[in-house]
Image (spheres, helix red, strand yellow):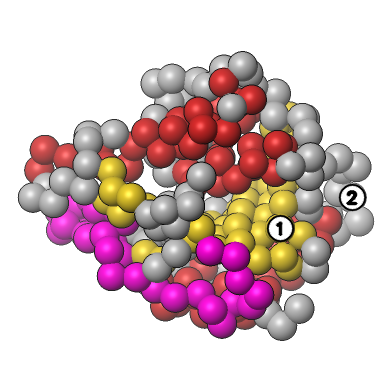
């Protein structure tokens, strides 16, 4: 899956946001490319998310040229634009025997992403990666992809790190002995959150990353300028 790029043209997934009010009716989903270092990550020209902001302005967000996989300190790291794609890569890691059930998800993000989707993928369906791919791309969006993994027993606990107080309460010495997934949204570094110490953010992200079985990172083009997102990404994870 994600071998070839494609467009979503129906009123589904992230394309459902303000669908009837937008002239553009399609969103681009890039193909997956395996790379050796973050200097190979490029921005694209296609619209990957489109909606109106709080001021009523239409934002046509352009994201990555590709989705990317890189082995960071021997840990698979997947980089993509819209955060719901994380769901597919978690289940891919399960199919590859990297992780199994009852994982702890460390969710570092400006948003909770825990709304409940209209449909929850079944335990039987997650055995088929094609069905997981279709569910990820046509049923869930950036705000509701976590709950399906919880309800299926894949994630037993979600640790939300979304504020300064969450960072300050993080205990470097006490991290549970379980399979850990780091799920990072680079919008946690958008300018409105600059009052939170960026070095503390980086320190905690790296601590969790080194203990994780898999890392998923979203550039979230609707919520953070993409050149800034990539600068933050490279600052956190390079060199390694």
What kind of element bears circle 2?
loop
Magenta stretch, residue numbers: 33-62
Residue 55 lies in the magenta-colored region:
yes
Q: Horizontal placement of 125 versus 93: left or right? A: left
What residue is shown with label 1?
A: 76
Q: Residue at x 80, y 68 (%)?
A: 73
Residue sitting nearer the eye, 46 or 190: 46
Q: Horizontal placement of 43 versus 194: left or right? A: left
Residue sitting nearer the eye, 82 or 71: 71
Residue 105 position within the rendered picture, expressed as x and y whole percent measured from the top left: 69, 42
Q: Quadrant of the C terminus?
A: bottom right
Q: Horizontal placement of 73 versus 81: left or right? A: right
Evaluate whether residue 38 shows in this view: yes
Alpha-carbon span between mark 2 and mark 1: 23 Å
Evaluate whether residue 223 shows in this view: no
Q: Residue at x 64, y 25 (%)?
A: 127
Q: Is residue 231 above or below residue 133?
A: below
Asked if marks 2 and 1 touch (Cβ < 8 Å), the reply is no
User: Which mark is first along the chain, 1 or 2?
Assistant: 1
Q: Residue furthest front?
A: 3
Q: Residue at x 59, y 27 (%)?
A: 128
Q: Residue at x 26, y 60 (%)?
A: 47
- Number of numbered tags placed on the structure image: 2
Disc 1 crowd rating (10 Å Cα; few below 14, some 14-19, many 20+) is some
Residue 169 position within the rendered picture, expressed as x and y whole percent measured from the top left: 75, 53
Disc 2 crowd rating (10 Å Cα; few below 14, some 14-19, many 20+) is few
Q: Nearer the viewer, mark 2 or mark 1?
A: 1
Residue 130 lies in the magenta-colored region:
no
Q: Quadrant of residue 224?
A: bottom left
What residue is shown with label 2?
A: 174
């Amino acid at each position: 899956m994600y071998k070839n790029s494609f467009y979503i043209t129906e009123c589904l997934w992230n394309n459902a946001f303000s669908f009837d009010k937008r002239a553009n009716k399609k969103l681009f989903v890039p193909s997956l490319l395996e790379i050796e270092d973050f200097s190979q990550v490029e921005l694209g020209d296609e619209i990957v998310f489109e909606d109106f902001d709080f001021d009523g302005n239409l934002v046509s967000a352009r994201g990555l040229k590709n989705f990317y996989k890189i082995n960071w300190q021997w840990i698979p790291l997947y980089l993509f634009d819209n955060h719901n794609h994380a769901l597919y890569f978690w289940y891919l890691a399960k199919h590859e025997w990297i992780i199994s059930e009852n994982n702890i998800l460390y969710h570092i993000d400006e948003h909770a992403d825990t709304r409940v989707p209209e449909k929850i993928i079944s335990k039987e369906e997650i055995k088929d990666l094609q069905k997981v791919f279709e569910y990820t791309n046509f049923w869930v969006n950036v705000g509701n992809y976590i709950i399906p993994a919880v309800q299926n027993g894949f994630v037993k606990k979600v640790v939300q790190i979304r504020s300064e107080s969450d960072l300050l309460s993080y205990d470097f010495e006490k991290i549970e002995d379980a399979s850990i997934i780091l799920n990072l949204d680079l919008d946690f570094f958008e300018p409105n959150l600059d009052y939170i110490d960026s070095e503390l953010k980086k320190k905690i992200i790296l601590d969790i990353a080194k203990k994780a079985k898999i890392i998923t990172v979203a550039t979230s083009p609707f919520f953070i300028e993409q050149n800034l997102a990539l600068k933050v990404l490279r600052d956190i994870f390079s060199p390694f």
